[in-house]
Amino acid sequence: MDIDDLLAEVTADAIPKETRDLQELTRAWVAERVAPELLLYPDALMERVLERIRKQIELVEEQTGNMDPKSGFKLIIIQTELERFKFLVRSFLRARIKKIDSHPLHVLQTHTSNPTLLSPSELQYLTQHQALLSQHYASSFLSQFPAALQRLDDTAGGVSMIEKPDEDTAVFCRALRDVGEVVVEGTDKRFEIQRGDVSVIRWSAVRRAVLSGDIELI
C-alpha cells in the first residue's frame, strides 16, 4: 500500500456515511448504465439507501405544515436531497430492468450460478415476466413446431438460443489501482493500465478488473 492509498483511506473515513452511500450509489448507477451486462446487485448499499429514503419521507411528512421559516428552509434541503436519492435509485433500477428484459434467459442462467446477481424483487419480476413470454410464444406459434424445437433455451447443434449481451462493447473506464497488463482477446493488443489511466476498451478486457473494484466505469 502506497501513500496515495493511505491518504484515500483517511479521506474516506472523514466522509460522512450518508455522503459515502451517495457516492457509491452514483458509481453503481453509472456502472450499470455503461456496462453491457447486468452487474451484481449491491444489496447492502440499496438496503441503507432505501431505509434512508423511507426515514426522510417520514420526516418530510411530519414537518409539512410547520410555519417556522427555519424549519421550512431545512425541509426544502431535505426534499432536494430526497429527490436526488430517488432519481438515482429509479434510474439504477430501470437500467437493470432493461437488461433483464433484453436478455432474460441469460440473466436467469447467470443468477442460477451466482445468486447475488439479482435482488429478490428482480428475480420475482424475471420469473413472472419470462413465464408470461413463454406462454405467449407457445400459444402464438411454438405449439405448431415439433416438440424438440419448442424450447427457448435450446443449445442443440452447438448453437445456443440464449441471447447474450455483447461483451465486445467499448466502455470508458478509469483505473483506481495499478492493474498491470491487459490483453484484448481475439487481437494482439496488450498494454499496461496504471492508476489514474482513462481508457476506452472492450468490456471483456476489463470486466474482471471492474468487478474486483480495480477499475471503475465512467
Image: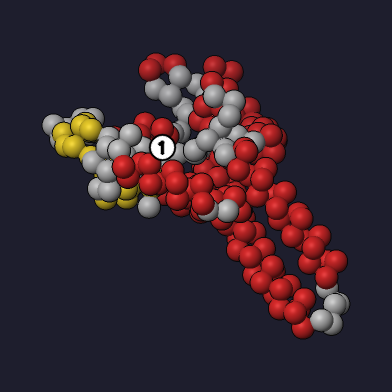
Tell which of 191 and 134 is nearer to you.
191
* Residue 105 x %, y %: 54, 30
Q: Secondary structure at mark 1?
A: loop
User: What is the number of callouts on the image?
Assistant: 1
Residue drawn at x 27%, y 35% is: 179
Quarter of the image that includes the N terminus: top left
Report whether 201 appears left or right of 72. left
Q: Which residue is mark 1?
A: 213
Examine the rendering and report whether any part of residue 33 can be seen. no
Q: Residues within 10 Å of mark 1 (few under 14, many from 20)?
A: few
Examine the rendering and report whether any part of residue 194 can be seen. yes
* Residue 117 x %, y %: 56, 32
Residue drawn at x 77%, y 76% is: 71
Q: Amino acid at mark 1?
A: Gly
- Splitting the image into 4 quarters, where does residue 183 fall? top left
Tell which of 154 and 115 is nearer to you.
115
Residue drawn at x 50%, y 30% is: 106
- Tell me which colouring the rendered structure shows: secondary structure
Residue drawn at x 59%, y 18% is: 147
Report whether 20 appears left or right of 36. right
In this view, 95 is above or below 168: below
